Amino acid sequence: MAVIARFRWRFSIATAFIILALVLSLVFALSSRAFTFASGAQLLQISTDPFTNPDSQHKTEVEPDTLASGSTLVSAFQVGRFFNGGASDIGFATSTNGGKTFTSGFLPGTTVNSTPPGPYLRASDASVAFDAKHNVWIISYLGIKNPSGPIDVDVSRSTDGGKTWSTPVVVNNDGHFNDKNWTVCDDTASSPFYGNCYTEFDDNTLRDLIQMSTSTNGGLTWGAAQSTANNTHGIGGQPLVQPNGTVIVPINGFAGNKFLILSFISTDGGASWGKTFRVSEVDFRHPAGGIRAGIPLPSAEIDRSGKVYVVWSDCVFEPGCTASDLVLSTSTDGINWSAVTRIPLDPVGSGVDHFIPGLAVDRSTSDGSAHLALTFYFYPVANCTASGTTACQLDVGFSTSADGGATWTSNTQIAGPMTLSWLPNTTQGRMVADYLSTSFVSSPAFPAFAVASAPTSGGADCFTATPNCNQAIFTVQDGLSVGGSSNPASNQITVSSNATLTDSTLTVQ
């Protein structure tokens, strides 16, 4: 019997150094790199993999996060994916004009492949935050000393609007195998904890013990890691901050061999963290074809009033669990959660499989008029295979809601189809992402997602065609608009929402 270590799956100074990194990191504007896919969606490529180290797969980019503040939108992602974890560096793409054009580059001083070189063999798991009080953009990520550990949690900071970035600042370097970091900052000026930033991660060495660390000075220094009050184990938390300063952290937890969606909160600016509460048990179906999507990681966002929205992949509404839908639950306090509601992207029984969601909520809207935008991957036919006549075809879809999730637009394809062999290979399967991200910039929403095409030479399999793969990070030209929606979200399951979690250790055979 093996413990959760099986899920070690994502590895994922000086001003002169920063300037040198900017010059040598192949920063480029991509405003003219637009592509139209079969659906008619106009996509904009915002980065490409320039690295040539022979031990990872090129040209590959995976797993983006995004965040917007004002007219600035920043995305961060892995570049040059390794088979057994992590990437050659962390890339970024920044728009200062509301998503019209982007400038891209790569974090300095992180890995042996970055410019200037850094202390780590690899990097992974990029997350973007903005600290309004200190006017600092933050990218948090994992610094991988060895694929089997130790793995540090680090941040890089930008004080010029996401154009240039610092060398790594350590959040946690306790010598353990740390994983799945995510960072958020309290940007409400009236909050008693305005300017606090919070990073969640899990300590895989301690069976994925949930950890939280707090910074009060724009990410320059970070406090000691703290556990939840009941020492819960989990992965993939996404902290959110309400206007009153309460931090709510939805996360994927474990109970026996089951996945759970959980939450916990802090009401004292990260001085302490409460016990975890159960949002819902997950009926999980691993997508076919050997794609890397082995845990139903939640995507969480918050609206103007402080209401939290959490979306994940679940097959509970599909008879026989033959495909997965995306489902939604909401909360105003992080303790009591609404009924789990099926998002009506496709009809029940359609056989369409939906997974890896990236939710955005317009922070200028709230409650019954909140604007939501959801990007995700899907298979038109869930019962598919890695290759052959029933080979899986991977697409990117989106849906929007103008009434807080009461109704939604139908699934609309914006990219694909992709053949799975075009994707970089990993120990957990072919990879586009463990998570996705979408962010509103004023009214339109801009997703970031990986799109693969056939390798430019060397055959159809990225793993053997490297360095001629062809997977990069894209967004949608002009963003996604939220309009009227006609599909009511009427399928619901009521769950015990405020039950305290007592057993959260995942064991697998």
Image (cartoon, grey):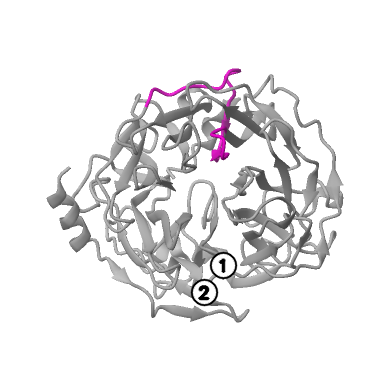
Q: What is the distance, in whole Å, between disc 2 and disc 1 at their CAs?
A: 7 Å
Q: Mark 1: which amino acid?
A: Pro
Q: Is residue 491 above or below residue 378?
A: above
161 or 388: nearer the viewer: 161
The mark found on residue 444 in the picture is 1
Q: What element carries label 2?
A: loop
Give percent across and percent down for residue 198. Answer: 45, 34
Label 1: which secondary element: loop
Q: Which residue is at 58% across, 18% downward?
A: 229
Q: In which quarter of the image is the N terminus?
A: top right
Q: In this view, does 293 lie to the left or right of 186?
A: right
Q: Would residue 242 be found to the left or right of residue 129 on screen?
A: right
Q: Name the residue under label 2.
A: 478
Q: Is residue 475 magenta?
A: no
The picture places residue 364, in percent across and down from the top left corner, at: 59, 56
Q: Which residue is drawn at 69% across and 26% down?
A: 256
Q: Is residue 183 visible?
A: no
Q: Do the residues labelled 2 and 1 touch (CB within 8 Å)?
A: yes
Q: Earlier in the sequence, mark 2 or mark 1?
A: 1
Span highlighted in magenta in the image: 223-246
